[in-house]
């Protein structure tokens, strides 16, 4: 068996029929995942990544799948494809935007572009476009999805006043994330 010298990371944000700069169509996403599965690629867990960076071996065709933000389409579009092809992925959540509520059924949900999603979040309507904790639990229990923190607030540090101390902002983000 040959072993990996490097670990490619495929990073995604949105999988949606509404096009955008960081959006992939469901058809293209499914085709990519099908190709990975049929070509013998192994999707890795966080424990395997850590072991690899400490010298453990991974199969030559190993890859890490990541999804940033915690968008609702990760539940509606991504998760069913991961299940179909038995692929492992990592979702990085903006924890302050994840709400409570029942699991949503993948039928009849509106489809939004990334720009529309961001506008809804700014209007206080994050629940319409972000995951819920119930959906996070369902995906976690499948064993196919691991969750990590993207941030608590997705603060744009480049848009904060220069007079603010960045370490103070980071402390606030960490403290707020612990309240969950």
Image (cartoon, helix red, strand yellow):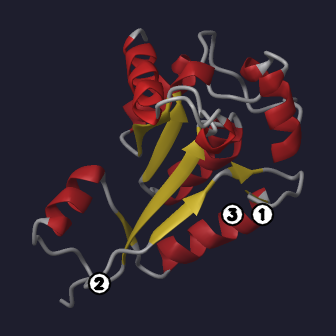
Residue positioned most to the left: 55
Q: Residues within 10 Å of mark 2 (few under 14, many from 20)?
A: some
Q: Is residue 12 visible?
A: yes
Q: Is residue 49 left or right of residue 156?
A: left
- On the image, numbered disc 3 is attached to which residue? 29
Q: Residues within 10 Å of mark 1 (few under 14, many from 20)?
A: few
Q: Secondary structure at mark 1?
A: helix
- On the image, numbered disc 2 is attached to which residue? 60
**Real-space Cα separation, disc 1 to disc 3, in angstroms:** 5 Å
Mark nearest the camera among 1 and 2 is 2
Mark number, residue 27: 1
**Real-space Cα separation, disc 3 to disc 2, in angstroms:** 22 Å
Q: Is residue 50 left or right of residue 79?
A: left
Which residue shows up at 74% across the image and 58% down it?
22
Which residue shows up at 62% across the image and 22% down it?
97
The image position of residue 38, as x and y in percent, is 50, 77
Q: Is residue 136 left or right of residue 74?
A: left
In this orientation, which residue lies closer to the viewer: 96 or 75?
Answer: 96
Q: Upstream in the sequence, badge 1 or badge 2?
A: 1
**Real-space Cα separation, disc 1 to disc 2, in angstroms:** 27 Å
Mark number, residue 102: none
Which residue shows up at 75% across the image and 32% down it?
106
Q: Residues within 10 Å of mark 3 (few under 14, many from 20)?
A: some
Which residue shows up at 70% across the image and 46% down it?
77
Q: Secondary structure at mark 3?
A: helix
In this orientation, which residue lies closer to the viewer: 177 or 127?
Answer: 177
Say if mark 1 contacts mark 3, CB within 8 Å.
yes
Q: Is residue 59 left or right of residue 24?
A: left
Q: Quadrant of the N terminus?
A: bottom left
């Amino acid at each position: 068996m040959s072993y990996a010298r490097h670990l490619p990371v495929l990073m995604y944000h949105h999988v949606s029929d509404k096009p955008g700069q960081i959006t992939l169509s469901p058809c293209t996403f499914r085709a990519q995942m099908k190709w990975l599965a049929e070509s013998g690629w192994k999707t890795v867990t966080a424990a395997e990544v850590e072991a690899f960076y400490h010298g453990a071996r991974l199969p030559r065709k190993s890859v890490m799948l990541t999804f940033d933000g915690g968008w609702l389409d990760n539940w509606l579009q991504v998760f069913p494809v991961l299940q179909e092809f038995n692929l492992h992925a990592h979702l990085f959540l903006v924890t302050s935007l994840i709400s409570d509520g029942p699991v949503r059924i993948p039928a009849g949900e509106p489809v939004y572009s990334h720009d529309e999603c961001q506008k809804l979040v700014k209007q206080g309507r994050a629940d319409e476009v972000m995951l819920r904790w119930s959906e996070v639990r369902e995906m976690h229990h499948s064993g196919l999805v691991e969750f990590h923190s993207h941030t608590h607030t997705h603060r744009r540090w480049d848009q904060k006043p220069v007079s603010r101390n960045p370490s103070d902002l980071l402390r606030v983000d960490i403290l707020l994330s612990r309240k969950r």
